[in-house]
Amino acid sequence: MDVLVELAQISKSYEEKAAVRDLSLRIEAGSMFGLLGPNGAGKTSTIRMIVGITLPDAGKVTLFNKPWASASLQRVGYLPEERGLYKKMKIADQLVFLGELRGLGAAEAGRRAHAWCERLQIAEALSKRTEELSKGMQQKIQFIATLLHDPQLIIMDEPFSGLDPVNTLLLQDTLLDLKKQGNAILFSTHRMDQVEKLCDSICLINRGEAVLSGGMRDIKSRYERNHVVVQYEGSDGFLSHPAIAEYKNYAGQAEIRLKPHADAQDLLRTAAATAAIMKFELVEPSLEEIFIETVGGRTDA
């Protein structure tokens, strides 16, 4: 499969602070890649080096199997974390203008803008000015602007910021459709629950360094299934079982983390002796839990 992005030991410092240190990663066509980490970890600095806003102090950036060149950016769509639409300009005119900057003719840019607005259920915004739209609607417009020129590599920095759950799901489904069409999608976020659902591969960074990277399933397989979800009625006395390292007990549901190599079946027998068990599920740790365990809570966020 084609590798659309490859970073080879890139580093970037600002004055005395190292934003990125010896970072390497690869993003293939037809995949979704999550760049994860707390605020200040170096995610945005990494993206800016990919799109040429800044240059690495060391290392190499390769796009579409060639050394980085500005001409390659015609095949890249970038939604930055810092949003920027013209407040007084009508959305239809604005999208045509942004499409023209990407090499589209005015008529084609207008056609694509209308089709995307219909798809994302925001056609009524075309005749309005930016200042008349909610933050969520503005976010969807910028999402559309990123995709107008049909880029092969789509880079999104916190793409779901400001969106309600319905519109978040709509944009997630759109990204998954684009992935199926063979596009590569890199998105950066501190919301690890979203990445866990969407991404094929990830790179978790902290203080500018990669602390975990690889395929999602491979990373998950490195960790013991030591989390248990129990739905029950009756006594919660089983929560004093010696196999339990910690737990959270809600109304009729306990979320438990077991001690290393603990016997989950013995816990189940104890629970069943004191309560009616509707659900007893041994689950793998979440990506967020893996990250917290990996960095040990040492972040700059």
Image (cartoon, rainbow, N blue to C red):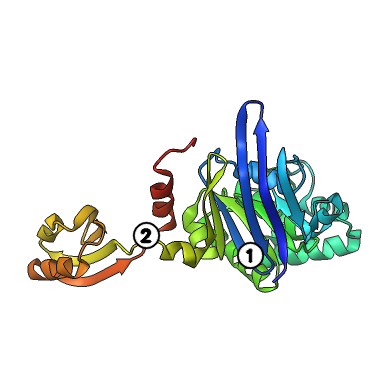
Q: Residue furthest top?
A: 16
In the rendering, at what x and y percent does residue 37 appear?
52, 46
Indicate which label's residue lies in the foreground, 2 or 1.
Answer: 2
Which residue is labeled 2 in the image? 285
Q: Nearer the viewer, residue 296 or 285?
A: 296
Residue type indicated by callout 2: Pro
Q: Residues within 10 Å of mark 2 (few under 14, many from 20)?
A: some
In the rendering, at what x and y percent does residue 285 appear?
37, 59
Q: Nearer the viewer, residue 130 or 222?
A: 222
- Of labels 2 and 1, earlier in sequence is 1
Look at the numbered discs 2 and 1 and tell me whether their residues touch, using CB distance below 8 Å.
no
Residue type indicated by callout 1: Leu
User: Element type at marker 1?
Assistant: helix
Count the marks: how many?
Answer: 2
Residue 178 picture quarter: bottom right
In the rendering, at what x and y percent does residue 119 appear?
68, 67
Q: Residue at x 50, y 51 (%)?
A: 191
Q: Which mark is residue 237?
A: none
Which residue is labeled 1 in the image? 175
In the rendering, at what x and y percent does residue 72 appear?
83, 56
Q: CA distance from mark 2 to mark 1?
A: 25 Å
Q: Nearer the viewer, residue 91 or 270?
A: 270
User: Element type at marker 2?
Assistant: loop
**Is 230 left, or right, of 66 in this rendering?**
left
Q: Is residue 145 in sight in this rendering? A: no
**Vertical placement of residue 300 versus 260, above or below:** above
